[in-house]
Amino acid sequence: MRHFFIAIVAVAIAATGAFAGSGDAEFVEITGAAGALVLREGPTTGAAIVARLDDGTLLRTVSCQMAAGRKWCEVKLPEDAAVKGWVGMTNLRVVPAPTPTN
């Protein structure tokens, strides 16, 4: 039941664009990508590929926007901000911020 509730909340947030451009540090996780999710230079399937990311990869959102009828988010790896690009929201789910491990 808990997973069902989390999924509903994630879909509602993605549908409303609640975290798009909010300025808050929001995190998403890749889930359900067949093989690997493609990180691109821009918010379009025609943009150059920056990297391929596996299911379970945690990403920090920078901003989100609609492009070509699809919601795209600019993201970066929390542990390596140099790895930055755009992914479609289809295979992302909103997750809580990670707990620091000091």
Image (cartoon, rainbow, N blue to C red):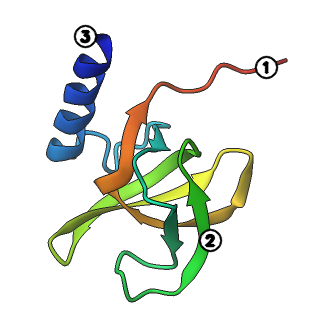
Q: Amino acid at mark 1?
A: Thr
Q: Gap between marks 3 and 1, in whole Å?
A: 29 Å
Task: Determine whether the residue tagged by mark 1 lies in a helix, strand or loop.
Answer: loop
Q: Which residue is mark 3?
A: 1
Q: Are marks 3 and 1 in contact (CB under 8 Å)?
A: no
For this rendering, which residue is in front, 34 or 68? Answer: 34
Residue 59 in picture, x, y percent from top left? 55, 47
In terms of image quadrants, where is residue 65? bottom left
- Kindly identify the residue that appears in the image at 34 percent across and 50 percent down: 21
Tell me the residue at 29%/55% (across/down): 90
Residue 74, picture quadrant:
bottom left
In the rendered structure, the answer to whether residue 67 lies left or right of residue 16 reads: right
**Is disc 2 surrounded by few (<14), some (14 to 19) or many (20+) residues within 10 Å?**
some
In the depicted view, which residue is nearer to us: 22 or 31? 31
Name the disc covering residue 51, or none. Answer: 2
Q: Amino acid at mark 3?
A: Met
Kind of element beneath mark 3? loop
Image height of 61 relative to 100, above or below: below
* 77 to 49, vertically: above or below: above
- Looking at the rendered structure, the number of numbered marks drawn on it comes to 3
Q: Quadrant of the N terminus?
A: top left
Q: Is residue 17 above or below residue 27?
A: below
Q: Where in the figure is residue 16, as x and y percent of width and height?
A: 15, 43
- In the image: residue 33, left or right of residue 9: right
Give the foreground label among 3 and 1.
3
> Which comes before the other along the chain, label 2 or label 1?
2
Q: Residue at x 39, y 48 (%)?
A: 32
Q: Residues within 10 Å of mark 1 (few under 14, many from 20)?
A: few
Q: Which residue is mark 1?
A: 101
